[in-house]
Image (tube, grey):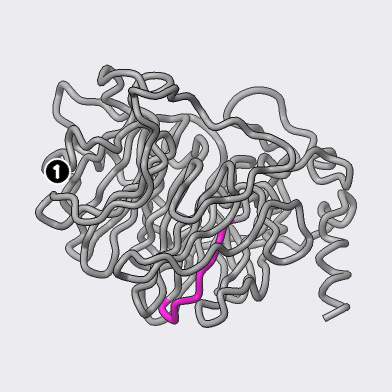
Amino acid sequence: MKKWIVVILAALTPATYAQQPSVPEIAFDSVPNFFKLPADMNFGEASGVAVNSKGDVAVYTRSNSAGGPAYGATASQILLFDKTGKFLREIGKGVYAWSYAHAIRFDKDDNLWAIDKGSDMIVRINPEGHVTMVFGRKKEASDNAEPWERVTPPRPPIPGQFRQPTDVAWDTDGNIYISDGYINSRVAKFTKDGDWVASIGEPGRGPKLGELNTPHTIANDAKGNIYVGDRGNRRIQVIDPKTNQFVREIKIDAPSPPDAQPWMGARPDVARLLAADAPPGAATMAPGSPWAICISGGPTQYIYAADAFPGRVYKLTLDGKVVGMLGKSGHQMKQFGWIHEIACPSENEIYVAELLNWRAQKLLLHPQARTSSQ
């Protein structure tokens, strides 16, 4: 165990970071013009994407922004497409929780779960399009509704209440795990019937397991283990659903190309972002910070994770080994602008939702054609 701690700490130093062995680049294609929107409709910031058992694809987009004030204009809309990319319909039009879209997931029964950061609400919608379960409650328009203030030290979380939640996952018993993300920095666990179980984790900058800085994304494997993208601490932490404890962490330490550029602005100073005296959460913009994760279907499951810079998607085994990566920041197809959610129905078919490029892409991976990066 001590040996692995030394290795992890060493990987965070700039010199060691530059000396990491090369990781294979996975060849891939982006399906051109896959999502066929009506002529009078556009995506806004695409914050979420999910695929159901029929292959239908839902995109959660920060659009429909003329609907009225939250603190800014309302920005949540779910658009559904069939497996060929044909537009089917809007889901949940006019739902009270819609304020500021963050993530969506389909569960095993094809219920669609929407996590709204602006209203602090999580809504389950059945395949027919009707709301069947609600978590959280947004501030009332009749009261002094205003954004949550981030204070130091953070306020303690309140059972049943959320402060800017981010994502949802499930274990094999159907228990529900909600990453309660920007303010509370914890995971809230409920039974499948919606009863409160536990608050897991607390705000912190690590390296202790269970310390979280913006748990931004969450996913589960076939055995019900829960993977939490601890974005501000640049790691994925794993919860054992039987004990409700964080049991291990995964760090992504693939080298960043020397000529890599962000989607906008100047190239970040990675060494400064990872320095011991960097501000809490600075690692959010460092290579390998998990903005989005998903776990593939199929007999052999893989983790797919995306960072903001250098804007790549990483393929990992469930024990954390990076086996490949693809893409980079940019405005063109096969490039990415802040991937905010990934859906991976199979190992070699994934979907990415991008905030900055206002789009979602369907990607087809060709790992047998991969080449080593330099």
- Where residue 110 appears, as percent x and y from the top left, is 21, 63
- Where residue 307 appears, as percent x and y from the top left, is 59, 47
Q: Tell me what residue is drawn at x 56 percent, y 74 percent.
A: 244
Kind of residue indicated by mark 1: Lys
Q: Is 223 covered by the magenta stretch?
A: yes
Q: Tell me what residue is drawn at x 49 percent, y 39 percent.
A: 335
Q: Quadrant of the N terminus?
A: bottom right
The residue that mark 1 highlights is 86
Which of the pair 23/315 is nearer the observer?
Answer: 315
Q: Residue furthest front?
A: 143
The 10 Å Cα crowd at callout 1, few under 14, some 14 to 19, many 20 or more, is: some
Above or below for 117 versus 227: above
Q: Tell me what residue is drawn at x 17 percent, y 57 percent.
A: 126
Indicate the quadrant where residue 275 lies. top right
- Where residue 37 appears, as percent x and y from the top left, is 19, 33
Magenta span: 222-229
Q: Is 140 covered by the magenta stretch?
A: no
Indicate the quadrant where residue 149 lies. top right
Q: Is residue 243 left or right of residue 37?
A: right
Which of the pair 202/4 is nearer the observer?
Answer: 202
Q: Is residue 107 left or right of residue 341?
A: left
